[in-house]
Image (cartoon, rainbow, N blue to C red):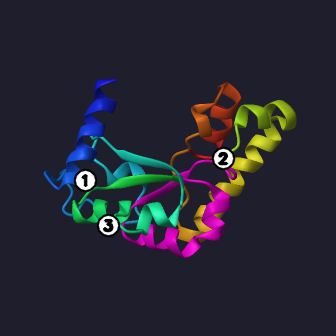
Amino acid sequence: MRKIAFAAVLLIFAFLGLTTMRTGLDSPAILDPTAPAEQLLPKKLIVLTFDDGPRPKVLFGENGLVPLLQTNNLPAHFFMVGKLVELHRDRVKFLHEKGFLIENHSYGHENLLEIVRFGGEKACLENIRKTNNIIYRATGRKPAYFRPPYLATNGLIKNVAEREGL
């Protein structure tokens, strides 16, 4: 709970322009997008993550999140929904080129427990793999992380994600 509160305070400070988070990287918001995720970030770090995108108005609109992150030199992971990546591929490519990490948040923001219940392991695998492929086509980088929508998961979903390298 403390880590969540601390991350919230950091984000508030960033919005107010009162602080800049440093990670020990030469330029934390401009990472090498071709490097494996585990090489991009120091061992101990609070990582800002954002789900359910890409949503252009939230990311790039007036007072958008991306300019805020860039101005304050803040790295972030964006857990994106595959069907939205398909709609906003250029925006996703731009984020990737600016050093933000693009990760898997399912194809259509489905509850994967329900997908498994009605479609089994194969349907879960297809959902995760399809999103990985969409992100790869947009960025040239396979996602390194998966966050199930609603944090709804079980051992089968975890195993499928791990077999896909997530």
Does residue 44 show up?
A: no
Seen in the picture, residue 74 relative to 112 is either above or below; the reply is below
Type of amino acid under label 3 = Pro
Q: Residue at x 39, y 61 (%)?
A: 100
Circles 2, 3 touching at the beta carbon (< 8 Å): no
- Give SS at disc 2: loop
In the image: residue 24, left or right of residue 41? left
At 32% from the left edge and 63% from the top edge, which residue is drawn? Answer: 31
Report which residue position mark 3 lands on: 67
Q: Which residue, as the protein is rendered here, is positioned at the far right?
A: 118
Q: Outermost residue toward the front?
A: 62
Q: Which mark is residue 15?
A: 1
Q: Which residues are magenta?
A: 80-108
Q: Circle 2 is placed at which residue position? A: 109
Q: Is residue 105 visible?
A: yes
Crowding at mark 1 (Cα within 10 Å: few <14, some 14-19, many 20+): some
Mark 3: secondary structure = helix
First in sequence: mark 2 or mark 1? 1
Q: Secondary structure at mark 1?
A: helix
Count residues near mark 3 (Cα–Cα under 10 Å), then give few for <14, some for 14-19, many for 20+. Answer: some
Instruction: Please identify the quadrant where the N terminus is shown.
Output: top left
Tell me which corner region of the image, top left, top right, bottom left or bottom right, holds residue 95.
Answer: bottom left
Front tag of 1 and 3? 1
